[in-house]
Amino acid sequence: MLKISNVTRRFGDKVAVDGVTLEIAKGQMVGIIGRSGAGKSTLLRMINRLTDVSEGSIACQGLTVSDLRGPALRNWQRDCAMIFQQFNLVPRLDVITNVMLGRLNQRNTLMSMLNLFPRQDILRAIEILERLGIEEHGPKRAEALSGGQQQRVGIARALMQDPRIILADEPIASLDPMNAQVVMDTLRRIHDEDGRLVICNLHTLDTARRYCDRVIGMRAGQIVFDGRAEELTTAVAREIYGADADFSEEATSTSIETLSRPRDAAVRRPELVD
Ligand SMILES: Nc1ncnc2c1ncn2[C@@H]1O[C@H](COP(=O)(O)OP(=O)(O)OP(=O)(O)O)[C@@H](O)[C@H]1O
Ligand SMILES: [Mg+2]
C-alpha cells in the first residue's frame, strides 16, 4: 500500500532519515522503534507530508505522495491522519467540537469557525465517541479530560476524517500504563475492525511486541531491523538501541505487560465490540 523508496531527509548538515526503503502492506499493524533522534517522527511526517523529503519518493497505490501539491496534497493528508503524543486538541473547546474539527479541511472554514456543523457530522462524531467509549465526555472541554481520554479524542478526530492510514507518533508516551493500554487497544481495534493501516512510533519494546505484527527498528536515520514482533529479541533490541550501558528492557518498557491480559483478549474485549 505504501512504497517508500530511498528516502532521505536532511536538516542542514543533519541527516534525520537516511536512504530508507520500505514497503508496507495493509493487514499488518506496524510499529517503528528506536532511540530518541533515530528519525522516527521525521519518517512519519514525510509520509503525511508535514515534512518534505530531501531525496527519494513515497508512493501509495499509484499516487506519488512526495510530489503532491494543492488540493491533491490536502486530500492525501485527509486520507492519512496523524495522532500526536501531545494530543493537539483545542483545550478550551468541547470534545465533540474537537472531534468535528477532523472534518475541517472537508468543510467550509467559516462555517466550522462559527461552530456550524452539519447534523450528519454531529451524528458521526457522537457515533465515533460512543465507539471509543468516551461519549459521556462529549460536552466537556477537552482540557478537563485525563490524558488517556484526550488521546482517545485525538483518535476520534482522526477517525472523523475516515482515513485509510493512521500515523501515530508516540501516542502513549505521555500516558500512564493503564491509559497507554486503553489507547493501544483502541488503535489495534481500528486496525482489526476497520482495515485501516496503522503505523505507530513507539518508544518502548514491550508495546511494539504486544500490539504490532511488524516492527521496524531505526537507528541514526536508517532501518536496522524489519521483522515480526516475535523476532524482536533482547539482542536485536540492543542492536537497535545501541549497546550503551543505559540500555535495559525496563528503560524501554511502558509496563503494559504488568497490567496484563493475553494479547488476543486485549484486542477483542467483548464490551468494546460494536
Ligand atoms: N525541524 C527540524 N530541524 C532540525 N533538525 C531536526 C528537525 N526535526 C528533526 N530534526 C533532527 O533530526 C533527527 C531525527 O529527529 P526525529 O524527531 O525524527 O527523531 P525521533 O526518532 O522521532 O526521536 P524521539 O524519539 O526523540 O521523538 C534528530 O537529530 C533531530 O534533532
Ligand atoms: Mg519523535
Image: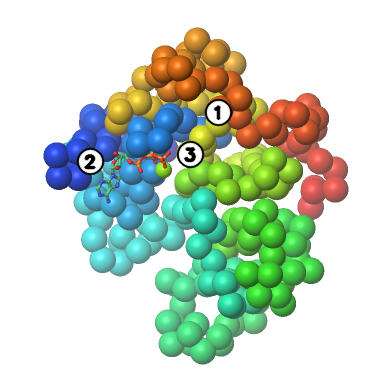
Q: Is mark 3 within 8 Å of ligand 2?
A: yes
Q: Check the image and name the residue furthest to the front.
A: 245
Mark 3 neighbour density, 10 Å: few (under 14) some (14–19) many (20 or more) = many
Q: Residue 171, can we see it? A: yes
Marks 2,1: beta carbons within 8 A: no
Taking the image as shown, residue 186 lies to the left or right of residue 269, namely left
Specify the quadrant of the image occupied by residue 110: bottom left
Q: How many dots with numbers?
A: 3
Q: Position of residue 79 (x, y in %)?
A: 44, 56
Query: Alpha carbon of mark 3 to alpha carbon of mark 1: how far?
Result: 13 Å
Instruction: Tell me the number on the disc at residue 201.
Output: 3
Determine the secondary structure under disc 2.
Answer: strand
Instruction: Between label 2 and label 1, give the one nearer the viewer.
Output: 1
Q: Is mark 2 within 8 Å of ligand 1?
A: yes
Which residue is at 42% across, 82% downward? 109
Looking at the rendered structure, the kind of residue marked 3 is Asn
Determine the secondary structure under disc 3.
Answer: strand
Q: Position of residue 61 (x, y in %)?
A: 37, 42
Query: Alpha carbon of mark 3 to alpha carbon of mark 2: how far?
Result: 17 Å
Q: Position of residue 124 (x, y in %)?
A: 66, 69
- Judging by the rendered image, the residue that carries numbered circle 2 is 9
Instruction: Between label 3 and label 1, give the one nearer the viewer.
Output: 1
Mark 1 neighbour density, 10 Å: few (under 14) some (14–19) many (20 or more) = many
Query: Alpha carbon of mark 2 to alpha carbon of mark 1: how far?
Result: 26 Å
Q: Quadrant of ligand 2?
A: top left
Give the mark nearest the N terminus, 2 or 1. 2
Determine the secondary structure under disc 1.
Answer: helix
Looking at the rendered structure, the kind of residue marked 2 is Arg
Which residue is at 80% across, 48% downward? 272
* Quadrant, the N terminus: top left
- Judging by the rendered image, the residue that carries numbered circle 1 is 252
Q: Compared to 247, does 208 lie above or below?
A: below
